[in-house]
Image: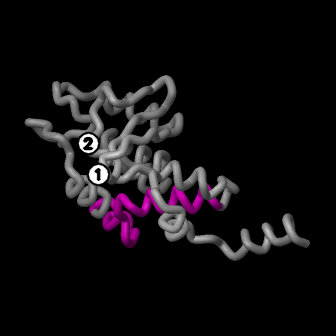
Amino acid sequence: LELMRDNCTNTRDLAIIDLLASSGMRVGEMVMLNREDIDFNERECVVIGKGNKERLVYFDARTKIHLQNYLSERTDANPALFVSLKAPHDRLMIGGVETRLRDLGKRLSLTKVHPHKFRRTLATSAIDKGMPIEQVQQLLGHQKIDTTMHYAMVKQQNVKLAHRKYIG
């Protein structure tokens, strides 16, 4: 993640990487966001998820800075949060985000770089740090906890530590 951040060539891609990495939102939710949807004071935004359901997602302070930098550089009037770098600055679509991330990954010799990986990584990291699975479920907008469980690659070392803490 740090390697990707360090090698971004523009503020938009840096903002995209940070928003995906810190919020856990789906790429389809992200590309539908408009500038006005972002609440910088609360570091949150409402996304429309699967089944047309609204949910609140949160982002970190670094993402806030990168989003504000990106938006301050824009000269277009498109309400979309993320737009193409060249005129006519159309709303960025899922395929555009996937392509940018894949190309950045290839340039850095990273394998399998795609938007969904950021979501999985956030879920795994949250669980590894002790976030209750029910909260991770809510964060990701999963209806069933089983779906959240598939996201979390539980580390054996954490199972061992948890066993020692709770059982012996």
Position in image of residue 40 (x %, y %): 45, 26
Q: Nearer the viewer, residue 50 or 97?
A: 50
Q: Is residue 117 magenta?
A: yes
Q: Residues within 10 Å of mark 1 (few under 14, many from 20)?
A: some
Q: Nearer the viewer, residue 166 or 101?
A: 166
Can residue 131 be seen here?
yes
Which stretch is magenta? 103-127
Q: Is residue 66 above or below residue 140?
A: above
Residue most toward the left?
Answer: 88
Q: In the picture, which quadrant includes the C terminus?
A: bottom right
Residue at the spot of label 2: 32
The secondary structure type at the circle numbered 2 is loop
Position in image of residue 5 (x %, y %): 43, 50
Q: Nearer the viewer, residue 125 or 73?
A: 125
**Residue occupying image coordinates x 27% and y 62%:** 103
Q: Is residue 59 magenta?
A: no
**Residue occupying image coordinates x 72% and y 69%:** 158
Tag 2: amino acid:
Met
Q: Are marks 1 and 2 in contact (CB under 8 Å)?
A: yes
**From the viewer's perspective, is 72 left or right of 167?**
left
**Residue occupying image coordinates x 21% and y 29%:** 79
Q: Residues within 10 Å of mark 2 (few under 14, many from 20)?
A: some
Tag 1: amino acid:
Gly
Residue at the spot of label 1: 28
